[in-house]
Image: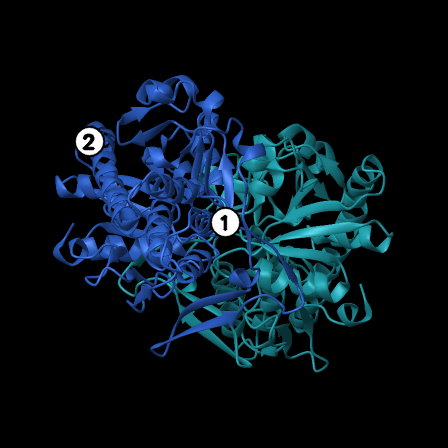
Chain colours: A blue, B cyan
Amino acid sequence: MKENSKKTRPIWLDEDLKVIKIIDQRRLPHEFVIEDLKTVDDVIMAIKEMYVRGAPLIGATAAYGVYLAALNSPGTTISKDYLKKECGRIKSARPTAVNLIWAADRVLSKILEVKNARKVIDIAKEEAEKIADEESDNCRKIGEHGLKLIEEISRNKKGKTVNILTHCNAGWLACVEYGTATAPIYAAFDTGIDVHVWVDETRPLNQGARLTAWELGEYGVKHTVITDNAGGHLMQHGMVDMVIVGTDRTTYTGDVANKIGTYLKALAAKDNNIPFYVALPSSTFDWSLQNGINEIPIEKRDPDEIRYIQGLDNNTIRSVLVPPPKSHVANYAFDVTPARLVTGFITERGICKATENDIKRLFPEKRQAKMTA
Amino acid sequence: MKENSKKTRPIWLDEDLKVIKIIDQRRLPHEFVIEDLKTVDDVIMAIKEMYVRGAPLIGATAAYGVYLAALNSPGTTISKDYLKKECGRIKSARPTAVNLIWAADRVLSKILEVKNARKVIDIAKEEAEKIADEESDNCRKIGEHGLKLIEEISRNKKGKTVNILTHCNAGWLACVEYGTATAPIYAAFDTGIDVHVWVDETRPLNQGARLTAWELGEYGVKHTVITDNAGGHLMQHGMVDMVIVGTDRTTYTGDVANKIGTYLKALAAKDNNIPFYVALPSSTFDWSLQNGINEIPIEKRDPDEIRYIQGLDNNTIRSVLVPPPKSHVANYAFDVTPARLVTGFITERGICKATENDIKRLFPEKRQAKMTA
């Protein structure tokens, strides 16, 4: 990461250890605002309203949220029922990203084991910090593994520009550092490969146009913002060498829930014989689900996120209404890309195919997952 | 059409016969503004800047443009060279919609035949009006033929809601009356079929959210605006019975150029076994082109159409900037859907498959098209 990016994670514990600091991602790229989360309610609001977003970051925020629950426990002792209830509230803030459940449960189960009640808060803090650090480390490794794929394309193209298409933001803003989908891109850029990124704007909340474009620009990576409609045309004309996206939940069979519209890009990649990779830390696998389309809950969000589009006018952030006020609007936030359309997964342990067998080759401890989940 | 829609075409000749009246479609749905076109330059500007858009309407506007050229001819006689030059300028206003070339050339060739110089203006006016009326009639017939497809789905669903997805605006605003893709929908609504339309917002210029939603709402047709990203998810979950779109240029082999993103919806329809129909008057066939992806020119428009999104704020139409100001942006306006993804064409002469043979079954006079075009 460059100096300016390296200094900042999208989430960190303040020096006084009582406040979680986050970047309010709703206001980027036009305003860089840091917000304080002091309570479990603050954490839930920040996740629900998407001050923070992206599966790994939602997980880290949830982990810090369980720490805040312990820290702010009413009374003189910390009740296990209270902790479970608060953890449950955090876990239901959003339905699709499995990291939310995974991270909150991991901190909770750690502190429920603690015999010495006075140590609960310290242990919660340690576990939350550990999750954030591990996710950062996982993303760094995803970058190393994914780099090899980009190096190979670059070699095959004899050093000509490698064009990578990505959807939504699976950058460091969505994670803790490096990003998932962007980690191989940053790694390629750092090694001097000529890389260019097609950035889907990603309606309705424009995380591509607002966040991915901002991240890549700050880092100095060449990129071009396009509408979500454009990727198929680019692929038909040989202008995309590879697609890399993130994911909010992936079944152990390889079905991928990600930002709405991902499925359409996967279809176009398949139709044009372009590799379609999904980058994820293992925390994003759901080892209990077999059929993504039938089993992964898809969030429906406020239609006003589609009706009103936010941007800068005259140095002020404003929202403008696009459709007729009376028209009905529906806002599906994710879709599921079936495993058959995925070329492979880039994980912290390496690259695998989108099949149960190959996923479990990398994660052999999960071979019994379906039974034990 | 309901009273309020019936009264208005998106283009008409004013009573004094010297001014072409158009609806400024850039300002809908929030403002209904009628503009005057008095010169060929006005016509070119209105087409380029998309005051008018949609292949059939671009054609009608071009036809009236050639009339204005004749009307405003400098000097005492109307020079054929002048008419050809003005017609050429009109034809190069936009590159993709073939109706533009077809309609302008049709008026030009008609008036170039005229022996009596004093009749040139009258004949130009008559031919332009004839094109507008014929296109209206063609759309009415497209509605009648397409209605049969919707009736069949309704019967198979035992009267339950028929859900139709459409992309961009191929409604009466894009044509002269009825629309192409919307004509079967309006016809189905008029016969009492329970029909609901999924309206892709259609970035970057949001013709779906702004124009199709407005048209359908005015007519009373149930509809829901969705992001361009959402259609695949809806199709996976059985929420779309049929896709109908328009087209800007279709090869005689069945490849379809239409608004960017159409190809992605066609892929999703194929993947989910959902019928994908393209509605078009025969003026939108290009009888000279065999390979749509290689041969149809795809317009690249101003990136600011993506950067700035227009809508209503506080009763004022404003534009807001979404991506970082320094980010590069590319604006591809159309893509090409290969014939293999198209279930059929709905034309004024009936329905045919997307094959050269079946297209020429309906248009036998074009059997020698490739040679004579």
Q: Do residues under tags 2 and 1 come within 8 Å of each other at their CB atoms?
A: no
Classify residue B57 as left or right of residue A121.
right
Residue depicted at x 38% and y 43%: A108
Disc 1 secondary structure class: loop
As drawn, the residue found furthest toward the right would be B191
In the rendered structure, the residue with mark 2 lies on which chain?
Answer: A
- Mark 1 burial class by Cα count in 10 Å: few <14, some 14-19, many 20+: few
With respect to residue B43, does A301 lie above or below?
above
> Which residue in the structure is indicated by mark 1?
A92
**Residue B292 appearing in the image:** no
Disc 2 secondary structure class: helix
> Which residue in the structure is indicated by mark 2?
A151
In primary-sequence order, the first of circles 2 and 1 is 1
**Which one is in front, A302 or B136?**
A302
> Image quarter for residue A101?
top left
**Which one is in front, A118 or B47?**
A118
Residue A66: x %, y % from top left: 37, 51
Amino acid type, mark 2 = Glu
Residue A264: x %, y % from top left: 49, 39
Residue B255: x %, y % from top left: 56, 37
Select label 2 or label 1 by which is in front: 1
Amino acid type, mark 1 = Ser
In the picture, the disc for residue A336 is: none
Classify residue B341 as left or right of residue A162.
right
With respect to residue B270, does B204 lie above or below?
below
Residue depicted at x 26% and y 27%: A349
Q: CA distance from mark 2 to mark 1?
A: 41 Å
**Residue A9 appearing in the image:** yes
